[in-house]
Amino acid sequence: GAVVSQHPSRVICKSGTSVKIECRSLDFQATTMFWYRQFPKQSLMLMATSNEGSKATYEQGVEKDKFLINHASLTLSTLTVTSAHPEDSSFYICSAISGRGATDTQYFGPGTRLTVL
Amino acid sequence: QQPVQSPQAVILREGEDAVINCSSSKALYSVHWYRQKHGEAPVFLMILLKGGEQKGHEKISASFNEKKQQSSLYLTASQLSYSGTYFCGTEVETSYDKVIFGPGTSLSVIP
């Protein structure tokens, strides 16, 4: 099956710093990538939809200036958490699909555990 | 808009069967099922498209009733490896590609 990687897998940072998380589709071109956040024992909450070459579409309640998403190529999307605070600590997961149809499977990355001190 | 899942949690003995339900208040185009182990990313199980089809093979299958806006995941003769949290994700007709996940169903299979 398709492989999606994320880097880093874990990051610990101080409050006020910015953290960049990379999501790569390794063996297919991802026209669309999604970013999710998951708090312990909760569901995955969609943060934004990222289409290659265009601005990301953010879900209601997600601050676009705080969570910067860039989808510069068909294999790479990045999420930058700016001025991170302890409440931003979470498990961030990206997923990618290869087309734009409903039949496309979302392939999830392994996730990034962010801890803000 | 988040789908509803039931039950919230279930404990099974190895070899027993389980059914996990997922329902939405909106008309659905597709339903996706994933299993997540603790600390790991979700793993894709299957997608069901509008049309009421049943999919799956052997011991894990699912059905999708688009009229009722419901899907069910069937696990038969459960194995220890089935333990995890099962999420359904729904794709509404007016918002293709965007999958909203339910709260999850925790499944524990014990010897």
Image: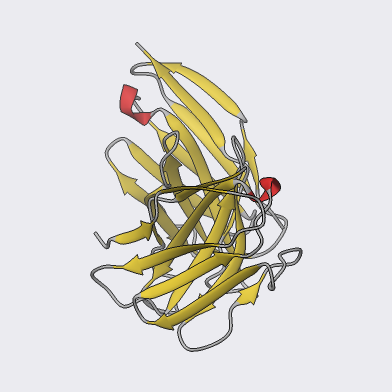
Quadrant of the image containing the C terminus of chain A: top right
Q: Residue furthest bottom?
A: A53
In the image, residue A59 lies at what x, y percent? 68, 68
The answer to whether any part of residue B79 appears in the image is no
| Quadrant position of residue A101 | bottom left
Image point (60%, 68%), residue name: A48
Q: Is residue A26 left or right of residue A112?
A: left
In the image, residue B73 lies at what x, y percent? 47, 41
The answer to whether any part of residue A97 appears in the image is yes
Image point (45%, 18%), residue name: B12
Quadrant of the image containing the N terminus of chain A: bottom left
**Observer-nearest of B106 and B75:** B106
Total label count?
0
In the image, residue A4 lies at what x, y percent? 33, 61
| Quadrant position of residue A8 | bottom left
Snapshot colouring: secondary structure
Q: Residue furthest right?
A: A61
Q: Is residue A29 left or right of residue B25?
A: left
**Observer-nearest of A111 and A60:** A111
- Residue B103, relative to residue B29: is it above or below? above
Image point (53%, 88%), residue name: A54
- Residue A104, relative to residue A92: is it above or below? below
Q: Residue furthest top?
A: B111
**Observer-nearest of B73 and A107:** A107
**Observer-nearest of B106 and A27:** A27
Q: Is residue A78 left or right of residue A55?
A: left
- Residue A107, relative to residue B85: is it above or below? below
In the image, residue B36 lies at what x, y percent? 44, 40
| Quadrant position of residue B69 | bottom right
Image point (68%, 53%), residue name: B2
